[in-house]
Amino acid sequence: MLKSSTPREVICMDVIRVERIRKRFGNKNALSEVSFSIPKGEILGFLGPSGSGKTTIIKILTAQLNPTSGQATVFNQPVAMMHQSAQKVRFGILSDNSGLYQRLSIDENLELYRQLYDLPKSSIDTVLHFVNLSEERKRKSSTYRKGCVSVLCWHAQLSMSQNYYF
């Protein structure tokens, strides 16, 4: 995006740019002409009741869903490019569901993430140390309270993906 300043032009890169996105499911409009941009360093939260399109726009921005019309870019790349492995490591998703496999230990879950993002083994120790769970790494995920799992997942996403988070 080009912003006009005094006599000079200042270039400001939008990390995410959404232009007139529409998404229909059958006869239902899930998104109607949604437009926004997020400059580098900004934080945006999606707030709204169930069914207002929050998850739909996130799925479009992470290439899990195609828009009916309009366009969106992430790091100046069309969202369709987010399917590529090199792009996937640039973002993390943390939803109400933790994404941890309940039957696996915290250590085993983090190992899956580590392999997915092709990170060094030391990344697991870094996450566990930060959330003070190094001594309990073999405990099953199902034995932790939701708040503890949320903190662990959030830090794992911050450590293992590099640029933006949903």
Image (cartoon, grey):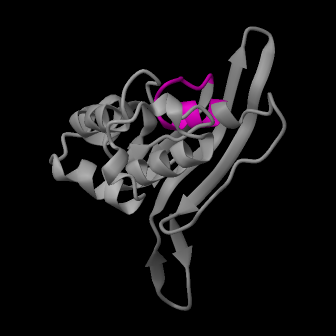
Q: Is residue 161 visible?
A: no
Q: Position of residue 142 (x, y in %)?
A: 51, 29
Q: Position of residue 45 (x, y in %)?
A: 67, 54
Q: Residue furthest bottom?
A: 6
Q: Position of residue 33 (x, y in %)?
A: 73, 37
Above or below residue 149? Residue 109 is: above
Which residue occupies the foreground of this view, 90 or 111? 111
Q: Residue furthest left?
A: 120
Look at the image and say whether residue 66 sits in the magenta stretch: yes
Which residue occupies the foreground of this view, 160 or 124? 124
Residue located at (62% from left, 27% from top): 69
Which residue occupies the foreground of this view, 113 or 142? 142
Q: Residue furthest top?
A: 26
Q: Position of residue 74 (x, y in %)?
A: 44, 47
Residue located at (81% from left, 42% from top): 48
Q: Is residue 124 left or right of residue 75?
A: left
Residue located at (35% from left, 33% from top): 109
Q: Is residue 150 visible?
A: yes
Which residue occupies the foreground of this view, 165 or 126? 126
Above or below residue 43? Residue 12 is: below
Residue located at (53% from left, 23% from top): 65
Identify the magenta region.
56-68
